[in-house]
Image: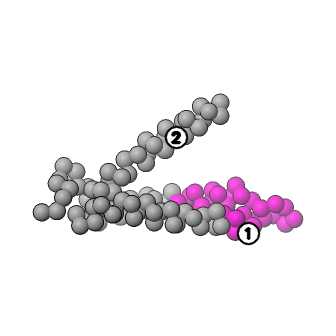
Amino acid sequence: MLACGAFAIQFAVQGAWGVIPAHLNELSPPAARATFPGFTYQLGNAFSAVVPLLIAWLAAEFRPAGGSPDYAKAMAIVAGITFLAVIALALLGYAVRPEARERALRSA
């Protein structure tokens, strides 16, 4: 059952995020086409590096009197904030620079 669950999670993750490099190439300006996708991926890694520290801090803040840290609540808060941020940034990105589908992806 664990292997089936891991397969289902990976299937959903690849289905949702597998197209992101192509989308980033369409969003990037022609002069930065080679560096933009890699830079944005690494920027995401830099932001996510502080998430374990944030979760540990939140869990300690939500600790019941005399109890252990509430990691479930902390992780739910961080996941919710991330979910809303991804939606907002996706909508903002589309509004600022629409999809470049079927356009030449090189500068003139």
C-alpha span from label 2 to label 1: 32 Å
The answer to which image quadrant residue 40 occupies is: bottom left
Q: Residue at x 73, y 69 (%)?
A: 61
Q: Residue at x 70, y 68 (%)?
A: 57
In the image, 2 versus 63, the foreground residue is: 2
Q: Nearer the viewer, mark 2 or mark 1?
A: 2
- The image shows residue 97 at horizontal and vertical percentages of 27, 63
Using the rendered image of the protein, determine whether residue 58 is visible from the camera's viewpoint. no
Dominant SS of magenta comes to helix
Q: Which mark is residue 61?
A: 1
Q: Which mark is residue 21?
A: none
Q: Residue at x 62, y 33 (%)?
A: 3
Mark 2 sits on what residue?
A: 10
Characterize the local packing of mark 2: few (<14), some (14-19) or many (20 or more) Cα atoms within 10 angstroms: few
Q: Quadrant of the N terminus?
A: top right
Which one is earlier in the sequence, the residue at label 2 or at label 1? 2
SS class of the residue under badge 2? helix
Residue type, mark 1 in image:
Glu
- The image shows residue 73 at horizontal and vertical percentages of 69, 58
Please determine whether, in this image, residue 67 is positioned above or below residue 20. Answer: below
Residue type, mark 2 in image:
Gln
The answer to which image quadrant residue 9 occupies is: top right
- The image shows residue 62 at horizontal and vertical percentages of 74, 65
Residue sticking out furthest to the front = 34
User: Residue 16 in magenta?
Assistant: no
Span highlighted in magenta in the image: 55-82
Using the rendered image of the protein, determine whether residue 84 is visible from the camera's viewpoint. yes
